[in-house]
Amino acid sequence: MFELTGRNALVTGATGGIGESIARTLHKAGATVAISGRQVDKLDKLAAELGDRVHVTPCDLGNRAEVGKLIDTAAGKLGRVDILVNNAGLTKDNLFMVMKDDQWDDVIAVNLTSTFMLMRAAARAMMRSKTGYGRIINVSSVSGIIGNPGQGNYAASKAGMIGMTKSLAREVASRGITANCIAPGFIKTAMTDALNDKQTEEISKMIPAQRFGSPDDIAMGALYLASDAAAYVTGQTLHINGGMLMV
């Protein structure tokens, strides 16, 4: 149903969890995929598993110089970037009163500033290509909607991502380019695996579905937003959280 043959996608944070699942899902739908992250060994492993139509494009999103080159690097390998998925994220949690400046700066740099830079470069390239198609998909978080104790920096970055995405969506909609967010709830990843059984049980009680989601749940949302089926969907936030937050 969601066919991406002939489309080219760049996925950041593709070294595991949600990003890896998104890369696999877009690739399975027919897209040629550039996978990005800091851990080259993991990127190479994923590329070997996917086989053809995949390119490794390492990048440290905390390094502005590297971020500034990523879209051009990916386009050089893909031919052009039709789909950008900003999935990579960083957490450095601490309570507001004791949060250090570098904890704030580092999270904002990776989660918000790099997303802005990649959106800007991708939108420019999509407009120049004159294909009448472009998809920008940003992975936000339920924390950006409701906040979370100890995550003032992370929540701010994810809330900022949503507002920024809406602004870009209004600017480029007439060119056939859409910009949307996905806001995952609690998803089974390495990050949530750090929770103990009691914490997992307590959190699950707050979720109407009574369980954590899987990375594939998020990937299917990204596949929809990347497809022609979502051509009239822009400036939206797709909440995938098992009913934890109903907006």
Image (cartoon, rainbow, N blue to C red):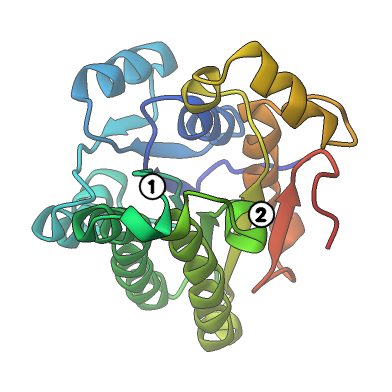
Residue drawn 23% across the image and 50% down it:
61
Please give the label number shown on residue 225. Answer: 2
Please give the label number shown on residue 94. Answer: 1
In front: 215, or 28?
215
Q: Are marks 2 and 1 in contact (CB under 8 Å)?
A: no
Indicate the amino acid at tag 1.
Answer: Asn
Indicate the amino acid at tag 2.
Answer: Leu
Instruction: Say whether residue 165 is visible.
Output: yes
Label 2, label 1: how many angstroms apart (C-alpha)? Answer: 33 Å
On-image quarter of the N terminus:
top right
- Figure quadrant of residue 21: top right
Q: Position of residue 242 (x, y in %)?
A: 82, 38
Residue drawn 35% across the image and 69% down it:
116
Instruction: Say whether residue 80 is visible.
Output: no
- Figure quadrant of residue 201: top right
Residue, far left: 65
Marks 2 and 1: which is nearer the front? 1
* Mark 1 residue crowding within 10 angstroms, few (<14) / some (14–19) / many (20+): some
Residue, far right: 208
* Mark 2 residue crowding within 10 angstroms, few (<14) / some (14–19) / many (20+): many
Residue drawn 42% across the image and 24% down it:
16
Q: Quick one: label 2 or label 1, which is nearer the N terminus? A: 1
In front: 220, or 1?
220
Q: Is residue 180 left or right of residue 228?
A: left
Please give the label number shown on residue 37. Answer: none
In front: 81, or 37?
37
Q: Position of residue 97 (x, y in %)?
A: 37, 59
Q: Position of residue 27 (x, y in %)?
A: 52, 31
Q: Secondary structure at mark 2?
A: helix
Q: Is residue 213 left or right of residue 139?
A: right
